[in-house]
Image (spheres, rainbow, N blue to C red):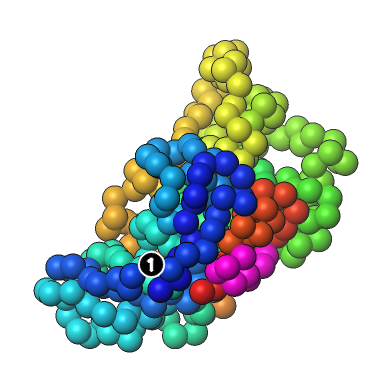
Amino acid sequence: MQAIIVKEFGSADQLSLTTIPDLVPGEGEVVIHVEAAGVGLVDVLQRQGFLGVSAPGYIPGVEVAGRVMAVGSGVDEYLLGQKVFAQGRDGYAEQFVASARGVVLLPEHVSSEAAVGLGVNALVASFSITRASLEAGEALLVRGASGGIGAMVAQLAVRRGAVVTAVTSPGMADSVAALGVQHVVRRGTDPQPKGPFDVIIDPVAGEATVAFVETLASNGRYVVNGAAAGFPPATISQVLLQGFTKSPTYSLLSLDSVPQEEKLAEATALFAQAARGELEPPIAQVLPLREAAEAHKVLEAGRLFGKVVLKP
């Protein structure tokens, strides 16, 4: 089968198409014929040598969708031919091994591309909203609203009845407005939003985090679920303490910390919403597997709306 490997840590040009042996499922495992693989910021950071990848030569990619083509011992053959979504490692390939207990059956009306368009992004968005205890009528600000996570936060929050302010680049303002948000702030063009906001959900972080923390209302909740712009400044704790009388809450959300059973249940619910037409995963681009380097370059440029998907 064909797969993408990271030859050396560094630029997107280190992504290379290669041929490796077909996969064989072990006990309790399935092999999925990959129809779509999601491309995310985590893949970029790993390729650059961050986030704990031990050595070059690995296959990137943490989420796929496709059909089960083989099952290992102890796995019900009912799964053969079923369309599924799965998380794990080595996703940029024609085949993917997953624990049978970790796959999510997909409704037939949800395509593999749509599944990874939702996938990790929608899960991070949903659990971030839960972490923030967002309620109907509350004022929410979401940063990076044209990105995969931000766009899903905006959609889910609108459905929950929140009053949503979305921060995005000027070129993406119309696309973000179409998500149903009440206010769109064009980064670098419009004035900085002043709030107060009951909740801020932030997949961007970086130096600007301080200015956004200062817009929290009393008892406001700030959830960071990504760092597209890098780490927040070290002064963030000082800023929080300066707002002590407002009792702000500042927290981090990684999907890795969520129990698998909760992720599987939430993914099933999200895919069901998509099948009913209640959620629309924004797909920025679908590229062939061999163009994985281009997919990373497009993602790093940041001038797109939604998810980048690879199609083996």
Instruction: Work out whether 265 lies above or below 197.
Output: below
Q: Residue furthest right?
A: 189
Q: Would you identify the image quadrant in which residue 298 lies?
A: bottom right
Instruction: Work out whether 188 lies above or below 94.
Output: above
Rendered residue at 37%/40% (across/down)? 54
Relative horizontal placement of residue 197, taking residue 117 as reference (left or right): right
Q: Let me know if residue 224 appears in the view.
A: yes
- In the rendered image, residue 310, in percent from the top left (x then y), is placed at 56, 68
Label 1: few (<14), some (14–19) or many (≥20) C-alpha neighbours in 10 Å: few
Q: Would you identify the image quadrant in which residue 74 lies?
A: bottom left
Query: What residue did someone put label 1 on?
Result: 20
- In the rendered image, residue 177, in percent from the top left (x then y), is placed at 76, 59
- In the rendered image, residue 25, in percent from the top left (x then y), is placed at 23, 71
| Element on which disc 1 rests | loop
Rendered residue at 14%/68% (across/down)? 27
Relative horizontal placement of residue 244, taking residue 51 as reference (left or right): right
Relative horizontal placement of residue 142, taking residue 62 as reference (left or right): right
Which residue is nearer to you in this view: 166 or 19?
19
Which quadrant, please, contains the N terminus? Answer: bottom left
- Magenta segment: 280-291
Instruction: Work out whether 63 lies above or below 223.
Output: below
Rendered residue at 53%/26% (across/down)? 248
Q: Residue furthest left?
A: 74
